Image (cartoon, helix red, strand yellow):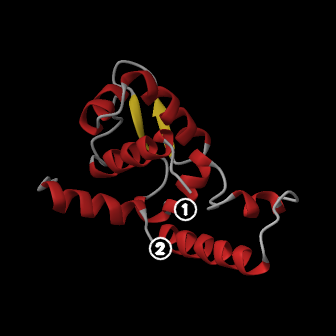
Amino acid sequence: MKVSSKGDYGIRALIDLAQNEGRGPIPSGEIAGRQGIPESLIGQVLASLRLAGFVGSVRGAQGGHQLAMRPEEIQMDQVVEALDGPITPGACLENANPACSGSAAQIEMWELVQTQIKDVLSSRSLADLARAGVAATGRYSI
């Protein structure tokens, strides 16, 4: 399994919104600048996050984006699936692929890998990542 650039940028944007929660709507350009997300992609990423229900937006001069859910309610498995599709480490597990000719042991191994990935992602909330990011960068909010 490989998280796409869109998935990576989406997680970065959510972390930024969580770390700046309470400031009101955040302009997409500010998010892109702080998180190293290309300006040409930030709109697409935020639109996908909005469609998934993680982000809300406000139009106008004081507009921008903000979380639509509490950071504690956003699990990373949900975010990755919303941005990149099903979490699967190989073609043999995608939609019960009939073309897969792997042995039962091989399929069992990939199912275990898939379960482990999902367990790690579902055990991490946006709040967890935002707190860890603040500690790592020394940033804090008053």
Q: Upstream in the sequence, badge 1 or badge 2? A: 1
Residue at the top extreme, as displayed: 61
* CA distance separating discs 1 and 2: 8 Å
Asked whether residue 140 appears in the rendered view, the answer is no
**Is residue 117 shown above or below 49?**
below
| Residue 67 drawn at (x, y percent) | 43, 47
Judge by depth and name the residue closer to the eye, 113 or 14.
Answer: 113
Quarter residue 130 falls in: bottom left
Question: Residue under circle 2?
Answer: 123
* Tag 2: amino acid: Ser
Res 68 label:
none
Instruction: Return the residue at label 1.
Output: 77
Q: Residue at x 50, y 63 (%)?
A: 75
Which of the image's four quarters has the C terminus? bottom left
Residue 54 visible within the image: yes
Q: Residue 110, image x and y in percent?
A: 65, 71
Q: Residue at x 38, y 26 (%)?
A: 63
* Mark 2, other Cα within 10 Å: few <14 / some 14–19 / many ≥20: few
Measured as percent of width and height from the top left, residue 9 is found at 42, 41
**Which quarter of the figure has residue 114?**
bottom right
- Please state which of residues 141 and 88 is positioned toward the viewer in this rendering: 88
Q: Is residue 28 left or right of residue 94?
A: left
